[in-house]
Image: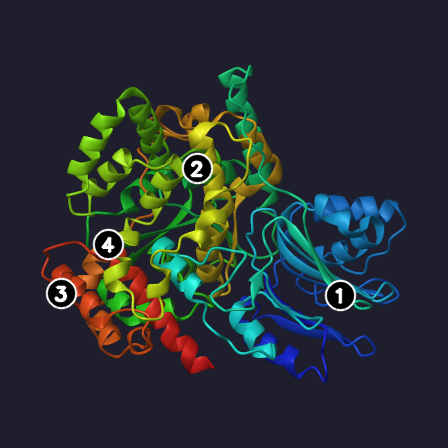
């Protein structure tokens, strides 16, 4: 794992050095810079040594120094590609996967991305053709930001680093702030800063020195699911097991200590079971729990670890930990992250880093294999609207809309919502925050209250979908997964220099999942195929455990260890001083939450995360 950056106006290399220095947490083991003085193109990398510790220095070149590459991530099939390229006459001086990219580019050009299996963001400078190639993996496991102005291109693994090396004013985008409040994340390919983009998952970008132009091209995307299949269920289960086991094996290749994040749920238990089957010694597993609230996965994880004989570690995240670490953690990412699971994800990564450098996680299983309960709720909503006359639905909707937009009332509002299934899904994932914008937004955001145009791309992932559930799954695969789930995993782990690998996002496994109808994925409580694979690997009971999200006791935290932080943010934060949010309105919600009158966590948490981030961001300018 690394942090990479580059520029097409390198100058004396000062900008590259600054960008590199700001990403030391992504690569504490090594650093390198290459500048083509004649073309003024520069590449830089910070390295977390995982493969070929001694010989994997970056940037790395071909034999005659005409092709240079930097890589953030891992190419899991690099050894197979290496043997193929050696057979075609290429000479290697290291075992690193970055050098494989150099020679793969020489043979396949831009189409090399089709041969690479892994999580990656990379850049390749071709000095002969005077062109720069950027690429991002299929699901967006690794980030890549870029700014293109007046024929000049700057890129980096993190937004903060890019802004430090790019001659532009960091102006906050009001539509991005609006989107963050509603969704809890910044939807790509945009960013929270005007003029900066993310390279979308499954895309390449080419910059030509001669013309100074860029061309962005998509090379991969999720495909529509079929409406039915003739393949027997037992064959689908067996194919799932074989592909997932192969993926787990590939993600266990490492020259440094490796472990598994274990929550006790289906996704992580299955990965742990397959990892244990393919290890000659007990694998290390890690679980986090809490000292407050009714959500805790310590016991389920412990039972799985005991059944598999893992070397198991448990960590309790206390209220004192929350008070000391959360304010700085919410402020730290390059873009704000509103997902409450960032807190336990980071705590787990921090604790695991004392024993391992690589951890295997379960991200992507819900989106590919139908795990979220909302898929089944939305399917019921579709059937509800089809079966009942419109006047009956309208009356029921009128009654439900009078309920407070909290708890079960929010779910019933979604079920009876008169709009499209996509809009019902949007109401679900935004927790009905759209209705609160008129009273909460300050002058900078108020003009956007009636504007929903910037959500059209999120809610329209493409034609040819298998009914409504497959439609929603596609939206999650192309927005929620890369812009929330994988951002959370990357930033929480990279802040402590830990690499996280995700077997469920293997290309072959993902494309197989796309070939299965959504009705099968969502059958029997969701993730039917994964549950049936797990049933053959662990004792009865674990495979049938109900879906429990990676929930945290955030409501308790806002009432106790984070109460002072929230109060200080409302009183002094730039989010209110600059006119993004109305202080009086948020104060009222905070008071009702503190008094236990209403649970406003779904509103107060994104406001707090955004405010702490903005204070840090302004201070960094």
Task: Please provide percent x and percent y for residue 43.
Answer: 70, 71
Circle 2: is it few (<14), some (14-19), or many (20+) Cα within 10 Å?
many
Whether residue 536 is visible here, answered yes or no, is no
* SS at circle 3: helix
Kindly indicate the quadrant of the structure image that contains residue 392: top left
Circle 3: is it few (<14), some (14-19), or many (20+) Cα within 10 Å?
some
Q: Pointer 2: what residue? A: 472
Kindly indicate the quadrant of the structure image that contains residue 611: bottom left
Question: How far is disc 2 from disc 1 in space, using C-alphas?
Answer: 42 Å
Q: Which mark is residue 587?
A: none
Query: Would you say 160 lies left or right of 313 here?
Result: right
Are the residues tagged 4 and 3 within 8 Å (C-beta)?
A: no
Q: Pointer 3: what residue? A: 591
Asked whether 548 or 543 is in front, the reply is 548
Question: How far is disc 1 from disc 4 in space, using C-alphas?
Answer: 46 Å
Q: Residue at x 37, y 44 (%)?
A: 426
Question: How far is disc 1 from disc 3 in space, using C-alphas?
Answer: 56 Å
Q: How is the image coloured?
A: rainbow
* On screen, residue 18 above or below 151: below
Q: Pointer 4: what residue? A: 553
Circle 4: is it few (<14), some (14-19), or many (20+) Cα within 10 Å?
some
Task: Please provide percent x and percent y for residue 305.
Answer: 38, 41
Looking at the image, tell me whether mark 2 or mark 4 is earlier in sequence order. 2
* On screen, residue 134 above or below 248: below
Q: Residue at x 50, y 51 (%)?
A: 482
Question: How far is disc 2 from disc 3 in space, using C-alphas?
Answer: 36 Å
Q: Pointer 1: what residue? A: 60
Are the residues tagged 1 and 4 within 8 Å (C-beta)?
A: no
């Amino acid at each position: 794992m690394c942090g990479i950056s580059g520029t097409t106006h390198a100058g004396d290399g000062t900008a590259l050095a600054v960008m590199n220095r700001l990403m030391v947490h992504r690569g504490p083991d090594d650093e390198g810079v290459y500048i083509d003085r004649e073309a003024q193109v520069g590449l830089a990398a910070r390295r977390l040594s995982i493969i070929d510790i001694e010989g994997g220095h970056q940037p790395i070149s071909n034999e005659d120094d005409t092709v240079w590459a930097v890589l953030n991530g891992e190419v899991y099939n690099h050894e197979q590609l290496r043997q193929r390229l050696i057979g075609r006459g290429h000479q290697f001086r290291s075992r690193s996967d970055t050098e494989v990219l150099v020679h793969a580019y020489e043979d396949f050009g831009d189409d090399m991305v089709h041969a690479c299996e892994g999580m990656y963001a990379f850049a390749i400078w071709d000095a002969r053709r005077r062109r720069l190639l950027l690429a991002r993996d299929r699901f967006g496991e690794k980030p890549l930001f870029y700014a293109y102005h007046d024929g000049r291109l700057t890129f980096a693994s993190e937004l903060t680093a890019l802004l430090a090396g790019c001659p532009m004013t960091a102006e906050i985008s009001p539509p991005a702030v609006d989107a963050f409040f509603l969704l809890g994340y910044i939807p790509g390919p945009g960013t929270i800063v005007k003029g900066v983009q993310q390279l979308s998952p499954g895309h390449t970008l080419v910059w030509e020195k001669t013309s100074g132009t860029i061309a962005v091209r998509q090379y991969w995307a999720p495909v529509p699911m079929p409406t039915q299949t003739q393949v027997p269920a037992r064959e689908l289960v067996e194919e799932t097991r074989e592909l997932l086991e192969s993926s787990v094996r590939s993600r266990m290749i490492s020259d440094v200590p490796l472990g598994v994040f274990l929550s006790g749920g289906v996704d992580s238990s299955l990965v742990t079971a397959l990892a244990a089957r393919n290890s000659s010694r007990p694998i290390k597993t890690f679980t986090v729990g809490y000292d407050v609230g009714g959500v805790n996965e310590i016991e389920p994880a412990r039972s799985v670890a005991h059944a598999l004989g893992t070397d198991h570690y448990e960590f309790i995240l206390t209220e004192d930990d929350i008070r000391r670490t959360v304010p700085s953690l919410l402020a730290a990412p390059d873009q704000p992250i509103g997902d409450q699971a960032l807190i336990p994800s980071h705590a787990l990564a921090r604790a695991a880093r004392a024993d391992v450098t690589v951890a295997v996680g379960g991200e992507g299983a819900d989106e590919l294999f139908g795990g979220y309960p909302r898929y089944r709720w939305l399917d019921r909503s579709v059937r509800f609207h089809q079966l009942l006359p419109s006047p009956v639905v309208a009356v029921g909707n009128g009654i439900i809309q009078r309920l407070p937009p909290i708890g079960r009332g929010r779910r019933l509002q979604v079920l009876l919502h008169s709009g499209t299934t996509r809009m019902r899904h949007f109401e679900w994932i935004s927790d009905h925050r759209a209705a609160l914008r008129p009273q909460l937004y300050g002058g900078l955001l108020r003009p956007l209250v009636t504007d929903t145009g910037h959500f059209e791309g999120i809610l329209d992932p493409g034609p040819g979908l298998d009914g409504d559930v497959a439609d929603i799954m596609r939206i999650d695969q192309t927005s929620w997964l890369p812009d929330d789930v994988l951002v959370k995993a990357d930033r929480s782990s990279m802040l402590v220099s830990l690499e996280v690998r995700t077997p469920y996002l293997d290309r072959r496994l993902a494309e197989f999942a796309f070939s299965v109808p959504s009705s099968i994925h969502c059958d029997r409580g969701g993730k039917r195929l994964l549950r049936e694979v797990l049933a053959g690997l662990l004792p009865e009971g674990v495979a049938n455990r109900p879906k429990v999200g990676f929930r945290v006791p955030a409501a308790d935290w806002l009432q106790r260890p984070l109460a002072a932080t929230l109060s200080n943010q409302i009183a002094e934060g730039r989010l209110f001083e600059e006119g993004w949010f109305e202080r009086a309105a948020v104060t009222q919600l905070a008071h009702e939450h503190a008094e236990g009158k209403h649970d406003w966590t779904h509103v107060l948490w994104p406001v707090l995360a955004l405010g702490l981030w903005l204070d840090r961001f302004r201070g960094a300018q």
